[in-house]
Amino acid sequence: MTNLLLGLNFEPQIESLGSDYWDVVDAARFPRTELRFRNNDLLRQLGIDPGAVKDHHLEQAYGCFEARTPLLALRYHGYQFGTYNPLLGDGRGFLYGQLRDRFGQLQDLGTKGSGTTPWSRGGDGRLTLKGGVREIIASEALHRLGVTTSRTLCLVETGEKLWRSDEPSPTRSSVMVRIARTHLRFGTCERLLHLRNAQGLERLLRHVVDVYYPLIAAAHPVQDGNAAGAIEAQLLAFYAELVERVARLAAEWMAAGFTHGVLNTDNMSLLGESFDYGPFAFLDQWEPGFTAAYFDQTGLYAYGRQPGICHNNLRLLQEPLAMLLPRQPLEQSLETFAPIYQSHYRACMQRRLGLPSSFDHNGNIEGGDDAVHKTLALLAAWPVGYGAFFAGLATQISTKGLPEEPEALLPVVLDGAEPARKAWLDWRDRWWTQQREAVSAEPDEAQAINARLQRWNLVKTPIRSVIEEFWQAIDQHDDWQPLQAWLKASCVD
């Protein structure tokens, strides 16, 4: 059977920018390849029939790297824990290729663990199998929870033994392939500022607008006689849109109870998409000071600080943009971050609670503050799992239906401590009243509330202990069934 993956119609979009943005690299040669995960949903998104793709086809394409050139390691810099680093770039992965999905959107295929590059900085360019498993879990859980995220196409085990200081070693190796809208980052722009390459930055940003922000490009066409003004208008509109997207992304992380762990500027996409999951973690209990990375000693990237860090990274992005644009309109756009974040956070929390959201003529959510505030107050006073709280509510409504009276709504997490009485009653009465008002106004809302609860919540949140359960089964018994069962329950084919 012909391997369809070796004949995909890739577009040389990044190559068209010129060689100042990337380096051509070779993939590593591995002792063996064994497919461990495939995402049929993403194959369909790329317009490929999963039934026509055998497991060994994925191994050939993304473990052996047959018939694919050029492979590109992208160049970028970044602020890492507040310190500027000009020695970054793709160090253990590369851009495999860019192609259109069945919706006409350009998608990147990016690898992780595929070998050394000029930017490996002495590293081996490899990815541990556990790291690949964790990336699958992060991306698929976030996708299920409504976060704008990259996703994992496949994971191939590669037969090498790796030594790591943060994992029991030797440990197994892998190559992971993700699909993301772009791998261009804030740090891509910061590198061009470091080089004082204003012309290169303009070329990059015009490419980003033309390819990924077509509505902005159409609203501000660049023509003879208006080129300078139109380009400035395009780029100002791009930054304003990026501020909105990043604000919404931060809200989605916070509602999901997700801590990225390393919100350096090189991990911030120019499209406002979440990607690159290293030391991430989902909240166990509600704790704003929770950190995901063991090396984050100061709590810089703690869960509760993520909106502020995203805001600060957008301000840092103004430094390279200021080579081309006036400061004042950039600052004016950044001022919209807080209200956009707050509105979208309320909407995300409302849907996790199963409650409807209404919006004013500006697209901002109306109401909902009271239910969200009481939810956070309850979780702060009740030592239960953050994700378990929402899952328990979803299960109770699914099995028992909407309660006729507030008293019929029982504590939604039955294991462990009893909820603080006042916090529970405040939340229970507010939630019951809001859902009752919604059903009274629209009888179909009874089914809609249950549907939202099932759609926007996970049966089991992949907190650290859950991930370790999956990994121990794989590591000790080569048993992938617990992970596969969780993925199936999370609506991944």
Image: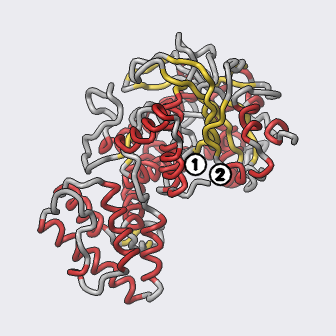
In the picture, measured across the screen, residue 248 lies left or right of residue 412, that is right
Residue 300, by quadrant, is top left
Q: Nearer the viewer, residue 204 or 180?
A: 180
- Above or below residue 275? Residue 166 is above
Image quarter hosting the N terminus: top right
Which amino acid type corresponds to the residue marked 1 in the rendered image? Ala
Question: Is there a contact, CB below 8 Å, between mark 2 and mark 1?
Answer: yes
- In the rendered image, residue 370, in percent from the top left (x then y), is placed at 26, 69
Task: Give the tally of numbered discs.
Answer: 2
- Give the left or right position of residue 298, taking residue 391 as reference: left
Residue drawn at x 25%, y 46% as measured from the top left: 287
In the displayed structure, 255 sits above or below 455; it is above
Q: Describe the element under mark 1 as helix, strand or loop.
A: helix
In this rendering, the answer to whether 189 lies above or below 165 is below
Q: Residue at 51% across / 56% down in the picture?
A: 490
Specify the label residue 237 is tagged with: 1
Density class for disc 1 (Cα within 10 Å; few <14, some 14-19, many ≥20) is: many
Asked whether 483 or 250 is in front, the reply is 483
Q: Which residue corresponds to the image point at 42% horizontal and 76% vertical from the top-left?
A: 449
When asked about the image quadrant of residue 342, the answer is: bottom left
Front-most of residues 473 and 377: 473
Percent position of residue 328, x then y: 45, 42
Q: Going from the N terminus, do you reach mark 2 or mark 1 first?
A: 2
The residue sitting at 49% across, 31% down in the picture is: 131
Q: Which residue is at the front of the view, 181 or 367?
A: 181
Residue 230's spot in the image, x, y percent? 67, 45
Q: Residues within 10 Å of mark 2 (few under 14, many from 20)?
A: some
Q: Which mark is residue 216?
A: 2
Cα separation, mark 2 vs mark 1, equals: 7 Å
Q: Quadrant of residue 289?
A: top left
Identify the secondary structure beneath mark 2.
helix
The disc placed on residue 368 is none
